């Protein structure tokens, strides 16, 4: 018997895509309003084509969220390290969005590794260590991460049908590094409005040698690319390409965001009337050039509170540090200084850390966030935020000896250099 030309699964996917297409094309304003006001419905619909990964922490589509975005370089057989670091803060309810560019050459103390460039954290400990370093060293309260390799970036942009960007100046670089070898692959991108394919878009966001202020100009181009992507996200042509785009997202994107939450995140970002762009760079006065003891060219903070003040303004949710939402941090892993380090990081993230120390639950292998049922209070939102940030499950149970409604029990699974 001949098989039908469309399988049952494909019919379901096609029905979802056609429904979305009809909504966006026929009644875009009404459809956008309905979806934005009911992110649970959008995520339920999205789950039919983007099944949720096992073990990820849910996002309700309404709460303020901070996502660390990593562009990964891996030209040969070397381990992946971060070529680009952006922090997206999104408040869907208030329709606010901001992007913060963080320099990869910032000199930081990487847990389990020691001092090094921020870009090294991903290489030696993967995305969890990169996120934890951002939290501990810069006070950025990261909820989720999303990382993309050069190859994944190229394939996703091509699946979108390319992206239209107004190139501010000619990018003529005979020393542009090739993607797969240590040789040079010269580029020459002309100025003006252009529709770039994946390979050329990657050259646009990576290029820095053509500029007098290399890294400053490059991060501005990277944010210009995201602005163009934001403009294109809700176009019917993008939706028509969903059948080829969605499988690529699952295959190429390295993330702990639930896959079915990605459309909600993208829609909220695209619908924000304005995106604030901020930079940690020399031009902002927040960092200055320097040299490490082993001769590396690095960036160092110019003042102790400069970067934390910017981070607080852009990323911190004031409700997390409200009265009555105190947190106790207990170490059960036996790692010297772990509870103090995590406590310091959480304070910089805006939480009220009432105390740190060792837990009676010694020998823990897994970190958990506990809603201490012995202490009254309405702190579910703070508890869930801690769970997302520490990538830990949330439990409700009594914790004797703790006088706060929230207790963090640290295990040996806390990120560190491998």
Image (cartoon, helix red, strand yellow):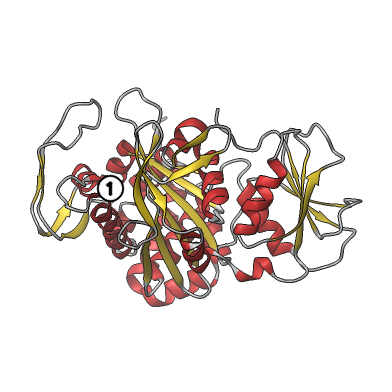
Instruction: List x then y, in percent, for residue 40.
Output: 58, 63
Residue 6 visible in image:
no
Question: Looking at the figure, which quarter contains the C terminus?
Answer: top right
- Drawn side of residue 309 relative to residue 212, left or right: right
- Drawn side of residue 69 relative to residue 225, left or right: right
**Residue position marked by numbered label 1 in the rendering:** 157
Instruction: List x then y, in percent, for residue 403.
Output: 86, 58
Instruction: List x then y, in percent, for residue 384.
Output: 68, 57
Of 92 and 8, the residue lying toward us:
92
Question: Looking at the figure, which quarter contains the N terminus?
Answer: top left
Say how many tags the image has: 1
Residue at left offset 60%, top offset 45%: 56
For residue 411, above or below residue 29: above
Residue at left offset 57%, top offset 37%: 111
For residue 30, above or below residue 198: below
Q: Secondary structure at mark 1?
A: helix
For residue 42, above or below residue 273: above
Badge 1 density bin: few <14, some 14–19, many ≥20, Cα 10 Å: many
Instruction: List x then y, in percent, for residue 21.
Output: 36, 62
Q: Residue furthest top?
A: 77
Residue 335 visible in image:
yes
For residue 4, above or below residue 142: above
- Drawn side of residue 23 relative to residue 318, left or right: left
Of 407 and 378, the residue lying toward us:
407
Of 6 and 75, the residue lying toward us:
75
Residue at left offset 66%, top offset 66%: 320
């Amino acid at each position: 018997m001949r098989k039908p030309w469309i399988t049952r699964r494909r019919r379901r996917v096609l029905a979802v895509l056609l429904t979305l297409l009809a909504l966006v094309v026929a009644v875009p304003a009404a459809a956008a309003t309905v979806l934005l006001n009911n992110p649970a419905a959008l995520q339920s619909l999205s789950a039919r084509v983007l099944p949720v990964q096992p073990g990820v922490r849910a996002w309700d589509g309404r709460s303020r969220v901070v996502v660390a975005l990593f562009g990964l370089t891996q030209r040969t057989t070397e381990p992946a390290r971060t070529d680009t670091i952006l922090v997206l803060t999104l408040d869907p309810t208030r329709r606010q969005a901001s992007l913060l560019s963080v320099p990869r050459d910032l000199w930081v103390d990487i847990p389990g590794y020691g001092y090094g460039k921020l870009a090294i954290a991903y290489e030696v400990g993967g995305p969890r260590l990169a996120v934890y370093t951002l939290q501990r060293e810069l006070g950025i309260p990261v909820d989720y991460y999303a990382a993309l390799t050069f190859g994944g970036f190229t394939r996703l942009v091509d699946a979108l049908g390319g992206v239209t960007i107004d190139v501010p100046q000619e990018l003529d670089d005979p020393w542009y590094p090739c993607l797969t070898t240590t040789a040079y692959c010269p580029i020459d991108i002309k100025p003006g409005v252009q529709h770039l394919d994946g390979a050329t878009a990657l050259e646009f966001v990576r290029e820095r040698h053509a500029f007098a202020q290399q890294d400053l100009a490059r991060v501005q181009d990277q944010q210009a690319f995201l602005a163009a992507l934001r403009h294109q996200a809700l176009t019917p042509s993008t939706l028509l390409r969903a059948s080829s785009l969605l499988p690529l997202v699952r295959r190429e994107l390295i993330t702990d965001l639930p896959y079915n939450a990605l459309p909600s995140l993208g829609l909220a970002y695209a619908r924000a009337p304005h995106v604030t762009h901020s930079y940690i760079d020399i031009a902002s006065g927040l960092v200055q050039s320097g040299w490490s003891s082993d001769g590396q060219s690095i960036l160092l903070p110019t003042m102790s509170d400069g970067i934390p003040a910017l981070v607080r303004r852009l990323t911190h949710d004031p409700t997390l540090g409200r009265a009555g939402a105190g947190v106790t941090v207990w170490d059960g892993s036996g790692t010297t200084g772990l509870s103090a380090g995590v406590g310091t990081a959480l304070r910089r993230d805006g939480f009220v850390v009432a105390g740190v120390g060792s837990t009676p639950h010694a020998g823990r292998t897994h970190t958990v966030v506990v809603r201490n049922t012995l202490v009254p209070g309405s702190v579910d939102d703070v508890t869930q935020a801690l769970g997302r940030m520490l990538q830990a499950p949330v439990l409700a149970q009594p914790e004797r000896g703790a006088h706060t409604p929230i207790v963090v029990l640290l295990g040996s699974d806390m990120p560190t250099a491998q």
